[in-house]
Amino acid sequence: MHCLRLTRLQRRSHPGFDCSVAGAQGNGCSVAASRGRQYILTEKLNVLVRVDLDHAKAQVLAKGHVTVRNVQALYVVVKRANALKEGLDLELDMRAAHVDPEALKQLEACSKTHHLPAKIDPHQSHCTLSVLPPRPAAPHRSQLLAA
């Protein structure tokens, strides 16, 4: 079964739709709520890179679900951005992503050591990487009402 995103029209026409019944959660997908709407998120990772060579800065913006399995893709993007200019300050913006705790630990370890994993960068080039961690999940409306 493929992951899908429900539009308002689909939710109205299927008022009894339950994501867990559709099998989305057990199929590599997770369910997220935003402004009272439920969406099914895939494991896909969307990455945008902004580079300012004049000021020696680059920003890698990640959206989606960052897992231990797909964090390797972020490392590759960071490595390519780091190779653009010597002494580039890289910022990995994870605020719009859902990041698994283990993946976040790996990214923060790279930030502290200033090196990417040897598997990704065998030459161990210096990498000035700062990680903007994901925002904490907002409490669900039912949790706010119970408080």
Image (cartoon, rainbow, N blue to C red):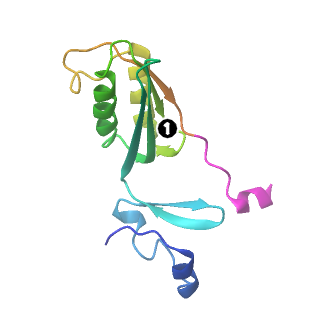
137 sits to left or right of 21: right
How far across and down, in percent of the image, does residue 6 sit? 49, 72
Give the extent of the magenta segment: 135-147
Which of the pair 48/15 is nearer the observer? 48
115 sits to left or right of 129: left
Q: Amino acid at mark 1?
A: Met
122 sits to left or right of 134: left
Q: Specify the farthest residue to the front.
A: 54
Residue 61 vertical position relative to residue 20 in the rendered view, above or below: above
Q: Is residue 43 magenta?
A: no
131 sits to left or right of 81: right
Q: Specify the farthest residue to the bottom.
A: 13
Is the C terminus in the top left, top right, bottom left or bottom right quadrant? bottom right
How far across and down, in percent of the image, does residue 96 sit? 53, 44
Is the N terminus in the top left, top right, bottom left or bottom right quadrant? bottom left
SS for callout 1: loop
Residue 37 vertical position relative to residue 131 in the rendered view, above or below: below
Which of the pair 88/128 is nearer the observer? 88
How far across and down, in percent of the image, does residue 141 sit? 72, 61
- Splitting the image into 4 quarters, where does residue 66 fall? top left
| Residue hosting label 1 | 94
How many neighbours does mark 1 have within 10 angstroms: few (below 14), some (14-19), or many (20 or more)? many
At 49% from the left and 38% from the top, the residue drawn is: 94
How far across and down, in percent of the image, does residue 101 sit? 46, 37
Which of the pair 122/139 is nearer the observer? 122
Q: Is residue 145 magenta?
A: yes
At 28% from the left and 21% from the top, the residue drawn is: 83
- Splitting the image into 4 quarters, where does residue 121 fall? top left
Residue 133 vertical position relative to residue 87 in the rendered view, above or below: below
At 45% from the left and 76% from the top, the residue drawn is: 21
